[in-house]
Image (cartoon, rainbow, N blue to C red):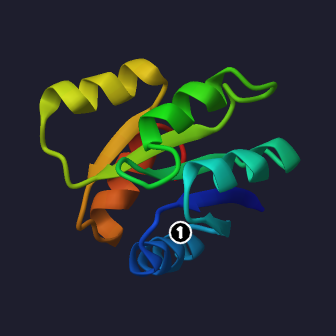
Amino acid sequence: MRQCLVVDDSRMIRKVSRSILETLRYEVTEAENGEEALAKCKAAMPDLIMLDWNMPVMSGLEFVTTLRGLDGGTQPKVVFCTTNRDEQAIHKGIEAGADEYVLKPFDHQSLQAKLQRIGAA
């Protein structure tokens, strides 16, 4: 089964993400900040990472930049989940190594469409 790591400081967003991803046949683990997520990636690299942009301890941008430098860190598909509609910020996230982004609040259909676009659905 494919593995997904959901990284978000909001328990509600993690819960919503988990329920959608499980219907897409992902086994889901969670982290509430980038530092915790990096530790989980070092232990077992997931296939997909749903990543919040704004988090305490380590931002999504810092996380993806660090992730891409790890052994095996180029393999997971990374989808930024953000409320930020600023195209420059989104472009910066893609440049740092994210594969796609989805705007919050997202639903099953919008998330599945983004995942299909990057071959992760």
Q: In the figure, 69 relative to 40: above or below?
A: above
* Residue at (48% x, 80% y) in the render: 15
Along the line of sight, which residue is nearer the eye, 53 or 116?
Answer: 53
Secondary structure beneath dot 1 equals helix
Q: In the figure, 27 relative to 118: above or below?
A: below
Q: Indicate the position of residue 70 as horizontal and vertical percent values.
A: 75, 26
- Asked where in the image residue 110 lies, by quadrant, the reply is bottom left
Of all residues, the one furthest to the left in this rendering is 86
Q: Indicate the position of residue 11 as horizontal and vertical percent values.
A: 47, 79
Along the line of sight, which residue is nearer the eye, 29 or 39?
Answer: 39
Please indicate whether residue 48 sits to the left or right of residue 73 in the image.
left
- Asked where in the image residue 90 lies, by quadrant, the reply is top left
Q: Residues within 10 Å of mark 1 (few under 14, many from 20)?
A: many
Please indicate whether residue 11 sits to the left or right of residue 35 in the image.
left
Q: Quadrant of the N terminus?
A: bottom right
Of all residues, the one furthest to the right in this rendering is 43
Please indicate whether residue 25 sits to the left or right of residue 94 in the image.
right
* Residue at (39% x, 18% y) in the render: 95
Number of labelled discs? 1
Residue located beneath label 1 in the image = 21
Along the line of sight, which residue is nearer the eye, 74 or 118?
Answer: 74
Q: Indicate the position of residue 61 as horizontal and vertical percent values.
A: 43, 34
**Residue type (three-letter) at the residue carrying disc 1:** Leu
Q: Indicate the position of residue 87 as horizontal and vertical percent values.
A: 14, 30
* Residue at (42% x, 72% y) in the render: 10
* Residue at (55% x, 57% y) in the render: 33
